[in-house]
Amino acid sequence: MTSGTVLITGAGTGFGKEIALRLADRKIPVIAGVEIVAQIAALKADADRRGVALRVEKLDVTDAADRRRAWEWDVDVLLNNAGVSEGGSAADLPEDRLRRQFEVNVFGPLLLTQGFARRMARRGSGRIVFMSSVAGLTTDPFTGAYSASKHAVEAFAEALYAELKEFGVQVATINPGPFLTGFNDRMFETWRAWTDDPGDRLFDYAELAFPHEQFDPEPVFERTVAVLTGEADGYRNLLPAAMEQATREQLDEPWTRVLDDDRTRPPLVQKAYDLKPGTAARGAAGH
């Protein structure tokens, strides 16, 4: 499969930005969607420095007008990359932050996808890729909102895979684990913007950090480009590959879990207290 024109949402930062630039470097037509107008000039400047041609458009996936405008673009491959992460205990999360998590990660991307999915189906070709997460398969303490949103993304991706197959439209997911881009650490700082009463919280979030060592993001860039161009044909793309067995074990664990009076703090909760932000995985590039 040759990719044709690729639309990437959330291309102003992180994974989306680098993937857009790498595709452009391969002379693949890219529309880089950014959330706010201020990101347009910055991304164009980055493209100029890399010596690549990149079309940059404002595309806030939660904005209905932006979504309608995007549907007018000629797109062969859609990468739903835009996303935010809200850290905090499910017992403490403020309502407005919880709703924002789902607006950006679930409702906006799905509503955007609907217009492109119908168009691709009528055309008889296309590829839709969701930037999900290992958190779409498993759940860690203090990441329940983010994980729940990615679980929802996984459900919609599974449904679309089956529903669009007969129309020649392919669907895939990218499932990054803990990669060192700043995204995971920022998740554990969002509490600073909460407007609730700190005295009502169960936890002091100043004491907590993302509970995993983090990898170099290079494998995510490589695999996502391969999926978008058709060089990789797997439906689920979990990275780093070394995490696959541990992920499967974490998925199986609830089947043997028992309810008892043991009040021992779970290991990952303790790790959130012990780790410093931005802790890198020892000697690993994430391959």
Image: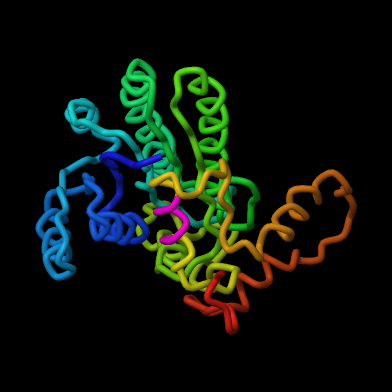
* Magenta stretch encompasses residue 164: no
- In the picture, measured across the screen, residue 80 lies left or right of residue 267, that is left
Q: Residue at x 56, y 59 (%)?
A: 239
Number of numbered markers: 0
| Residue ID at (56%, 48%) | 147
Residue 224 in magenta stretch: yes
Q: Nearer the viewer, residue 85 or 135?
A: 135
- On screen, residue 14 versus residue 207, left or right, reads left
Q: Quadrant of residue 181?
A: bottom left
* SS majority, magenta: helix
Is 123 above or below relative to 131? Answer: above
Vertical relation: 282 (above or below) 210: below
In the picture shown, does residue 186 fall above or below 149?
below
Q: Quadrant of the C terminus?
A: bottom right
Q: Which residues are magenta?
A: 221-226
Looking at the image, which residue is at 54% across and 67% down?
210
**Relative depth, front residue between 55 and 209:** 55
Instruction: Give residue 165's position: percent from left, percent from top.
Output: 52, 23
Residue 221: x %, y % from top left: 41, 61
Q: Position of residue 30 (x, y in %)?
A: 23, 47
Looking at the image, residue 266 sits to the left or right of residue 65; the answer is right
Quadrant of the image containing the N terminus: top left
Q: Position of residue 64 (x, y in %)?
A: 24, 28
Seen from the viewer's position, the closer of residues 242 and 199 is: 242
